[in-house]
Image (cartoon, rainbow, N blue to C red):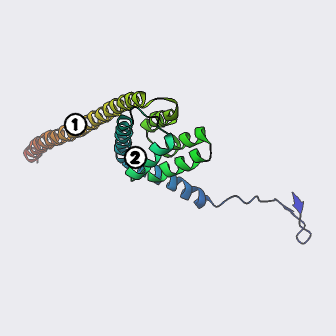
């Protein structure tokens, strides 16, 4: 507290906080980013599956030869659309010698659970032979296909539940309408008899 010399009264020191609208804007941006990531998750999963198939094909082609992660990431970058910037950043970090950080980029930037598994496979490319890589890619492909199937079944169940609830509510409204109409007409007859 300090005393103003002009008015001789105590003034409280007011702390100025950030504009509350800035916080709202940040919240709205994060909500927008989450909605976009949810909408794009199916497309990203499809692109991860395509990358998996591309990696498996490369592993089959180079079955007897040693493969480098650099070459495979380059090929994945060439064949992808949505994940192209992510693969470019992974390749850049990998070429700088930051292997661990490079492969962490995929599951940090891509909001899909399968991205973590795929990044683990990519991180082991230099350590395993192409036959093992092909097996890992097969396993990843099956896992991703199972997840997508489960997600599709869950979506179908949700849609079925919504349809059932809508039909039940419309039948309930129809029955309530009938009941109210019957009661109102009988009440009207009773009132006409009384008066």
Q: Pointer 1: what residue?
A: 160
Which residue does the image show at 44% across and 36% down from the upper left?
A: 118
* Side (left or right) of 129 relative to 43: right
Give x and y (percent) for residue 177: 14, 44
Using the rendered image of the protein, determine whether residue 80 is visible from the camera's viewpoint.
no
The Cα atoms of the two marked residues, 2 and 1, are separated by 21 Å
Using the rendered image of the protein, determine whether residue 129 is visible from the camera's viewpoint.
yes
Secondary structure, mark 2, is helix
Q: Is residue 34 above or below residue 61?
A: below
Q: Nearer the viewer, mark 2 or mark 1?
A: 2
Whichever of labels 2 and 1 marks the residue nearer the N terminus, that label is: 2
Q: Choose top left, top right, bottom left or bottom right for residue 58.
A: top left
* Side (left or right) of 116 relative to 179: right
Q: Residue furthest front?
A: 64
The quadrant in which the N terminus is found is: bottom right
Secondary structure, mark 1, is helix
Q: Residue furthest right?
A: 5
Q: Choose top left, top right, bottom left or bottom right for residue 100.
A: top right
Q: Are marks 2 and 1 in contact (CB under 8 Å)?
A: no
Q: Pointer 2: what residue?
A: 38
Q: Residues within 10 Å of mark 2 (few under 14, many from 20)?
A: some
Considering depth in this image, is 57 or 105 the residue closer to the camera? 57
Query: Which disc is residue 31 wearing?
Result: none
Give x and y (percent) for residue 47: 36, 45
* Side (left or right) of 143 relative to 95: left
Considering depth in this image, is 1 or 186 the residue closer to the camera? 1
Which residue does the image show at 62% across and 42% down from the upper left?
A: 98
Considering depth in this image, is 192 or 165 the residue closer to the camera? 165
Q: Residues within 10 Å of mark 1 (few under 14, many from 20)?
A: few
Which residue does the image show at 40% across and 46% down from the upper left?
A: 38
Q: Choose top left, top right, bottom left or bottom right for residue 155.
A: top left
Q: Residue furthest bottom?
A: 6
């Amino acid at each position: 507290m300090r005393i103003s010399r002009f008015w001789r009264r105590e003034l409280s020191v007011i702390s100025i906080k950030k504009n509350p609208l800035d916080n709202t804007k940040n919240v709205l941006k994060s909500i927008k980013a989450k909605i976009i990531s949810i909408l794009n998750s199916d497309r990203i999963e499809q692109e991860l599956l395509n990358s998996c198939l591309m990696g498996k094909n490369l592993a089959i082609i180079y079955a007897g030869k040693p493969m480098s992660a650099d070459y495979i990431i380059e090929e994945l970058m060439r064949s992808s659309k949505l994940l192209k910037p992510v693969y470019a950043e992974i390749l850049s970090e990998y070429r700088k010698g930051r292997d661990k950080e490079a492969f962490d980029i995929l599951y940090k930037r891509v909001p899909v659970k399968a991205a973590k598994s795929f990044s683990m496979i990519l991180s082991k490319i230099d350590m395993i032979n192409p036959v093992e890589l092909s097996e890992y890619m097969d396993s990843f492909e099956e896992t991703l296909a199972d997840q997508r199937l489960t997600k599709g079944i869950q979506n179908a169940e949700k849609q079925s539940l919504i349809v059932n609830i809508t039909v039940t509510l419309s039948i309930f409204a129809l029955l309530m309408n009938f009941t109210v109409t019957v009661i109102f007409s009988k009440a009207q007859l009773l009132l006409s008899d009384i008066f």
